[in-house]
Amino acid sequence: MRHSLRLTLLLPLLALLLAACQTTTVMRQPGAADHSTPEQQLLADDYARNGDWDLAQALYRQLAEQVPPAQQPRYLNRAAEMLYRAGRHDEIEPLYADRDDTDWPPAERQARQILLAGAMIQRGKTYRALSALPAVDAIEDRHYRALALAIRADGLLAIGKPLEAAELRIQRGQLLDDPQQRLDNQQALWDTLNRMGEPAVIKALARPLTPQLRGWLELNLIARRSDMLPQKLEPWIAKWRQLYPGHEADGDFVQSLLENSRLIYTRPRQIALMLPLVGKLRGVAEAIQDGFLYAWYADPGNRDDPKAPPKPVIDLIDASSDPLDFYLQYGQAVEDGADFIVGPLSKPLVNSLLAEGKPAVPTLTLNYADDANRGAENLYQFGLSPEDEAEQVADYALVDGRYHALTLTPDTRLGERLRTAFTRRFEALGGQVVGGADYAARKSDYSVPIKQMLNLTSSYRRHDILQTVIGRKIEFIPRRRQDVDMIFIVGNPRQARLIKPQLKFHRAKDLPVYATSSVSSGSPDPDADRDLNGLLFVDTPWSLQNASNPDYQEVARRWPKSVKRYGRFFALGIDAYRLIPALRRLLINPDEKVAMNSGILSVDRNGRVHRELILATFEKGLARVLKERVDEAPIEGGKSTAR
């Protein structure tokens, strides 16, 4: 019966689906008869159960036009839900256009509110959506209450409240009867917890929590601290099961976690470290190599745990910058037994590796390819990307309530790249870049671009015109533009020390100035950096929290001169070694994050490692930490990073 019904309705339904792609609202003629059939309703529900969202929404939409007016709200809401699940969020609001819900049953009116709010969250209107959602306790329909909990959880996660979002996911799980839906909800809960840094998880565990939430957090901490190494994970989960008998995760979810650990753990036997130890990148390469080897020496391997795998052998290679020679070296390293490659460092070689496709063995480059939207199997990319930093500035500024920005960047390719990265991120999240200017990177006087950026040039021109008209000199106070609440600058320490006082002179003293880590030398210099007082910038834990960092203390003791100039590259080398075992796990779970010297790290689906940095400011010429993460409250009174 079911199969013959599908065949009977499939062709007209496909025609309807094509028509639905061209129009969003079909008006029912007044007095039209009810032409719907029970078979159509059953088929629509069947498509919905099987996840055929596009076909289901088309059929529900057709049913809404065929049934009497009193039944229309139910089918409109079902069509909207199918659009939501299909990711066609822009079509939900037009579906409801010109539909007055005044006479709708309260439950259907609530469903409409929930679905419109879900569409708003997916389109970035998070705060508006959260305020529009009905209170959960007021939603009587069990199905839509579960949907509202999922939507509110997504909204809280979007505004940086993963713990609260996880609590809602637990509530939602209690409303789900279907085993697959429960497992999907648990995976969403796990992804939510992975958005928290390990310090945030530990901090949360110090609070009073429900047994369910505490069990999830401890399970997440076990996964992190075991690095998904089966030899560690399995006995730790056995102890967890004793502490949390009957926990909702102890079933299919924990079983999948154990199975994944056997598939995703990476522990190479021999690593070839390929860096250019001669030429213009020599200093950077040596710092990375020293950091990498420091981390290798500090790795206990199986010294304390005979069941753990031994440390890998390290093969040091002076990598050529010539692509042909580099590939010959790469092939020889693999032939000599390397089952993991770290390098190259130069961007052209990384571009070449990406273009070639899948490398012979897993490879972690120490720079990024130009194409951020493309990846290759076995290829991971890690480096100190300034674009990541510009995006971090946009995140921090928006969380601080800055929505209208100016940009001041050098007339270089790097300046253009960072201006583009900041603008793209800032505007994607609801901000607006209302203007900007480029400055000559080699000069010291930036007054012309600054006046142009602040519209002071127009103010002076109006003054000149007015004096000419009235024929005498008049008192004049130039007035900068008033439609902005922040400035994003790009520059090195010398440039930033010149820009900040010039902004103050040109009547922008009250505008917050944000920058990337390039404005800081990474070493304390209070006399030179007093001109940077008040400037907000992002930087790594290595640079800002090194007083309590044993890695920094040991590296500074061994390489006291090099660490001042190449400090962040020592951190990159240390993190590159320690990141290797977790790379595949992070690739599979892009929401998971690990705290390291270079920042809080995650890996996207293309194998690119992203860094989350710390927000700091200068006070009396010294860097002071303000916020350790975008989604955390400011540190009260700040934290001095003076050493």
Image (spheres, rainbow, N blue to C red):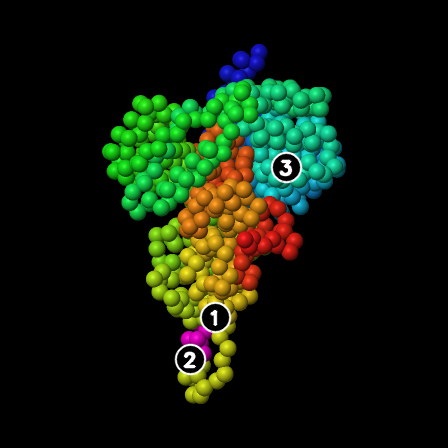
What number is the disc on residue 506?
1
Quick check: 49 above or below 514?
Answer: above
Local crowd size for mark 3, using a 10 Å CA cut-off: few (<14), some (14–19), many (≥20): some
Marks 2/3: CA–CA distance: 61 Å
Kindly indicate the quadrant of the structure image that contains residue 320. Answer: top left
Relative to residue 163, is residue 88 drawn left or right? left
Q: Is residue 125 magenta?
A: no
Marks 1/2: CA–CA distance: 18 Å
- Of the two numbered discs 3 and 1 in the rendering, the one whose residue sits closer to the viewer: 3
Q: Residue at x 38, y 66 (%)?
A: 444
Kindly indicate whether the residue at mark 2 contacts the one at mark 1 (C-beta within 8 angstroms): no
Kindly indicate the quadrant of the structure image that contains residue 606. Answer: top left
Residue 447: percent from the left, percent from the top?
A: 41, 69
Q: Which numbered disc, 3 or 1, marks the residue that appears first in the sequence?
A: 3
Kindly indicate whether the residue at mark 1 contacts the one at mark 3 (C-beta within 8 angstroms): no
- Of the two numbered discs 1 and 2 in the rendering, the one whose residue sits closer to the viewer: 1
Residue located beneath label 3 in the image: 201
Q: Residue furthest front?
A: 557
**Type of amino acid at the residue the image marks with label 2:** Asp
Q: Which numbered disc, 1 or 2, marks the residue that appears first in the sequence?
A: 2
**Type of amino acid at the residue the image marks with label 3:** Val
